[in-house]
Image (spheres, coloured by chain):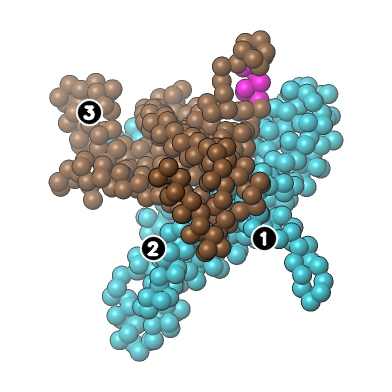
């Protein structure tokens, strides 16, 4: 009986979940079709907004790649048997895990110079690279914790077994422990990736040309309240259609791993 | 007088380490900066209860089993979880605030301040995180316990109030504390709409003094401290509420 009770809301909510993938873009399309003058204005601005969003995606990919690389190394350093390896990693993770993303983006933007002198050449150091570094620092601290948690979640008997088979500590890590960690840390890693994608909008506050910035530009140029509304709805729709599928997939993976 | 000497000593000590905290000796900048700390703490202190209350309401709606209650809340939760807080804040401030202003007839009559919008947006954003955690806790309450309560004549609301929420709150407390920590960090978005919290105040100081590194050290230490306190209070509550033999 309780099965029947839990089954009914599941089915209808599944329909709602699929609607979630297309709801926001659909709203934008329907609204611009109803009010054609607004739609025409929006179509003109879409390429500009899209160029902004491509910057968001670029920052996300770079920050997550950098953050993952650094984070895995830091996570393993936290588990090292030597205190002079362990301690710096622990301090780094503790400080930056508690730092707001915005503060880190401001820090990297204002601390780094706007150009670097390299062999007598002036190389520009663009703002978006600084935002990448800021977000990478944050994600590396999160991913270090995820890596550490994943390694610790592997039963100690497996370490003992590898020792019995004559593996060194690093070999055991490389061939036995880490492959299992990849599977376990995938859902939380995807959470971090999607929150980094959302964090890229903060870069607009330091003047990076990204989607938020583009929307603000567009709404100040057009000066219509309904266009302002639809411009921000487009921003939300873009982030939502990027992050919602990731969130769904994460939940799906979590359920499957818990069952398996 | 004693206080001035201490400040002077601190500035002197720090400048020997190569750190520039000279603005502390000035009246105005130091005042703005101190107010920034207070505004942030005030923001956090108000937003935490808001997020908890709405988190409970959302979770109750999500688990009510009535589609007209759960579907809108589910939609809201998914929307807030999957869009950036900054975008939500700008949308609320630029769109909803303008609509409210038009309704009451001009911006000068609008009672809603930027501070209100930060509390509302960040509070509801984190409430969505809480709602998911508490919902998980409510669903984890064994069905035999609910049947027993129903057998004793509890109504649906009484079951929620006396059985499900007390147990769900305990099991979801670690997730709630994580949510509160992200709340503390999210309050910094307020500087996008000129709420003079600590990040905003620090920017004011470093544009004048060019001492970004020094301000960053203080900022990071401050946020680490608040989060440490929040996490400690969470642990304390968890220990206080622990029922022997139930949960972890």
Q: CA distance from mark 1 to mark 3?
A: 55 Å
Q: Find disc 3 in the rendering and name its residue.
A: B162
Callout 2 and callout 1 share a chain: yes
User: Mark 2 falls within which chain?
Assistant: A
Near mark 2 (Cα within 10 A), the count class, few <14, some 14-19 or many ≥20, is: some
Q: Quadrant of residue A130?
A: bottom right
Colour seen for chain B = brown
Question: Relative to the observer, which residue lies in front, B9 or B124?
Answer: B9
Left-right relation of B25 to A26: left
Which numbered disc flags the more N-terminal residue, 2 or 1? 1
Question: Relative to the observer, which residue lies in front, A70 or B207?
Answer: B207
**Can residue A234 be seen from the camera position used here?**
yes
Is the N terminus of chain A in the top left, top right, bottom left or bottom right quadrant?
Answer: top left
Q: Secondary structure at mark 1?
A: loop
Q: Quadrant of residue A29?
A: top right
Left-right relation of A144 to A119: left
Q: Secondary structure at mark 2?
A: helix
In the rendered view, would you say A55 is above or below B127?
Answer: below
In the rendered view, would you say A202 is above or below A95?
Answer: above
Question: Relative to the observer, which residue lies in front, A130 or A117?
Answer: A117
Q: Find disc 1 in the rendering and name its residue.
A: A112
Q: Secondary structure at mark 3?
A: helix
In magenta, the rendered stretch is: B95-101
Q: Residue at x 65, y 37 (%)?
A: A237
Q: Residue B99 colored magenta?
A: yes
Q: Residue at x 54, y 60 (%)?
A: B15
Colour seen for chain A = cyan
Eye-nearest disc, 2 or 3: 2
In the rendered view, would you say B33 is above or below A68?
Answer: above
Q: Find disc 2 in the rendering and name its residue.
A: A149
């Amino acid at each position: 009986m309780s099965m029947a009770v839990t089954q009914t809301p599941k089915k209808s909510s599944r329909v709602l979940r699929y609607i979630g993938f297309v709801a926001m873009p659909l709203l934008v399309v329907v609204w611009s079709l109803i009010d054609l003058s607004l739609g025409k204005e929006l179509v003109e601005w879409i390429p500009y907004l899209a160029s902004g969003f491509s910057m968001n995606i670029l920052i996300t990919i770079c920050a997550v790649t950098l953050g993952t690389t650094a984070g895995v190394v830091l996570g393993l350093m936290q588990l090292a048997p030597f205190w002079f390896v362990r301690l710096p990693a622990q301090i780094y993770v503790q400080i930056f895990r508690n730092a707001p993303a915005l503060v880190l983006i401001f820090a990297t933007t204002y601390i780094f110079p706007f150009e670097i002198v390299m062999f007598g050449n002036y190389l520009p150091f663009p703002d978006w690279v600084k935002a990448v570094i800021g977000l990478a620092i944050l994600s590396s601290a999160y991913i270090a914790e995820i890596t550490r948690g994943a390694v610790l979640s592997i039963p100690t008997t497996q370490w003992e077994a590898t020792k019995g088979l004559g593996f060194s500590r690093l070999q055991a890590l490389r061939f036995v422990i880490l492959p299992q960690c990849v599977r376990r840390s995938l859902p939380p890693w995807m959470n971090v990736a999607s929150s980094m994608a959302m964090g890229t909008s903060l870069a607009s506050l330091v003047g990076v040309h990204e989607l938020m910035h583009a929307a603000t530009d567009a709404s100040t140029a057009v000066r219509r309240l309904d266009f302002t509304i639809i411009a921000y709805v487009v921003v939300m729709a873009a982030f939502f259609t990027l992050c919602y599928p990731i969130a769904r997939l994460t939940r799906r993976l979590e359920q499957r791993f818990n069952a398996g | 007088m004693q206080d001035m000497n201490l400040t002077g000593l601190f500035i002197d000590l720090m400048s020997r380490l190569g750190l520039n905290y000279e603005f502390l000796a000035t009246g105005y900048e130091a005042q703005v900066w101190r107010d920034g700390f207070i505004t942030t703490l005030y923001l956090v202190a108000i937003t935490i209860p808001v997020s908890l209350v709405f988190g409970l309401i959302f979770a109750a709606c999500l688990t009510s089993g009535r589609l007209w209650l759960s579907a809108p809340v589910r939609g809201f939760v998914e929307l807030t979880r999957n869009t950036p807080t900054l975008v939500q804040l700008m949308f609320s401030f630029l769109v909803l605030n303008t609509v409210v202003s038009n309704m009451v007839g001009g911006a000068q009559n609008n009672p809603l301040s930027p501070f209100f919008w930060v509390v509302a947006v960040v509070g509801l954003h984190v409430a969505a995180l809480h709602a998911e955690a508490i919902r998980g806790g409510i669903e984890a309450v064994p069905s035999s316990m609910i049947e027993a309560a129903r057998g004793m004549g509890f109504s649906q609301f009484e079951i929620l109030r006396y059985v499900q929420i007390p147990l769900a709150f305990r099991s979801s407390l670690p997730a709630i504390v994580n949510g509160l920590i992200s709340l503390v960090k999210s309050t910094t978005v307020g500087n996008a709409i000129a709420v003079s919290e600590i990040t905003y105040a620090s920017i004011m100081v470093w544009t004048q003094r060019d001492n970004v590194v020094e301000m960053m050290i203080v900022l990071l230490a401050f946020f680490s401290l608040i989060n440490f306190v929040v996490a400690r209070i969470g642990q304390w509550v968890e220990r206080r509420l622990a029922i022997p033999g139930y949960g972890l």
